[in-house]
Image: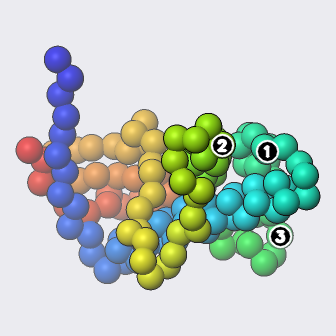
């Protein structure tokens, strides 16, 4: 039997800002991947594997222009790139429509954090990349 835990987060303003930063970084990585795949396809190239794109993204993070990406856990960007590549693969298999860019206004802000990187206590949740203080108080049921 698989058990699940429902968690309701109650973040303060600093934590909300950090959560939105994570979500916007995931959106940026997803859109960057879709753009790279489109550009590659239009130039007659084959599908670029997500591991290659992650390496390129890591190199891009070293540039001064994209230094802000270092403030976010690499698991967030890794998963966003993987999701975009999966969407592209599904399109070419005929299982879904062509992947669209995520919009800042119309898309629901979300990101994936590896469950190994999340720590639970009775009253708090600690997410990798946040300050040493636990994330918000929560209600676990």
Q: Is residue 78 visible?
A: no
Q: Position of residue 94 (x, y in %)?
A: 58, 41
**Structural distance between the alpha carbons of marks 3 and 2:** 33 Å
Q: What element carries label 1?
A: loop
Residue beneath label 2, please? 92
**Structural distance between the alpha carbons of marks 3 and 1:** 22 Å
Residue 50 appears left or right of 39:
left
Q: Please report whichever mark, 3 or 2, sits nearer to the chain's N-terminal start.
A: 3
Which label lies toward us, 3 or 2? 2
Residue found at x 27% / y 43%: 120
Residue 50 appears left or right of 106:
right
Residue beneath label 3, please? 63
Residue that lies at the very extreme toward the top in this rendered image: 1
Q: Where is residue 92 in the image (x, y as percent from the top left)?
A: 66, 43
Mark 1 burial class by Cα count in 10 Å: few <14, some 14-19, many 20+: some
Q: Quadrant of the C terminus?
A: top left
Residue found at x 78% / y 43%: 47
Residue 56 appears left or right of 135:
right
Residue found at x 75% / y 40%: 49
Residue found at x 17% / y 46%: 6
């Amino acid at each position: 039997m698989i058990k699940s835990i429902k968690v309701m987060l109650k973040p303060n303003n600093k934590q909300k800002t950090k959560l939105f930063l994570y979500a916007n970084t995931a959106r940026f990585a997803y859109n960057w991947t879709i753009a790279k795949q489109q550009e590659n396809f239009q130039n007659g190239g084959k599908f670029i594997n997500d591991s290659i794109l992650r390496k390129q993204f890591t190199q891009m993070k070293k540039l001064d222009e994209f230094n802000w990406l270092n403030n976010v856990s690499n698991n967030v960007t890794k998963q966003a790139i993987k999701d975009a590549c999966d969407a592209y693969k599904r399109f070419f298999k005929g299982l879904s429509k062509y992947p669209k860019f995520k919009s800042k206004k119309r898309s629901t802000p979300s990101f994936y954090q590896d469950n190994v990187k999340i720590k639970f206590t009775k009253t708090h949740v600690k997410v990798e990349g946040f300050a040493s203080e636990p994330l918000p108080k929560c209600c676990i049921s």
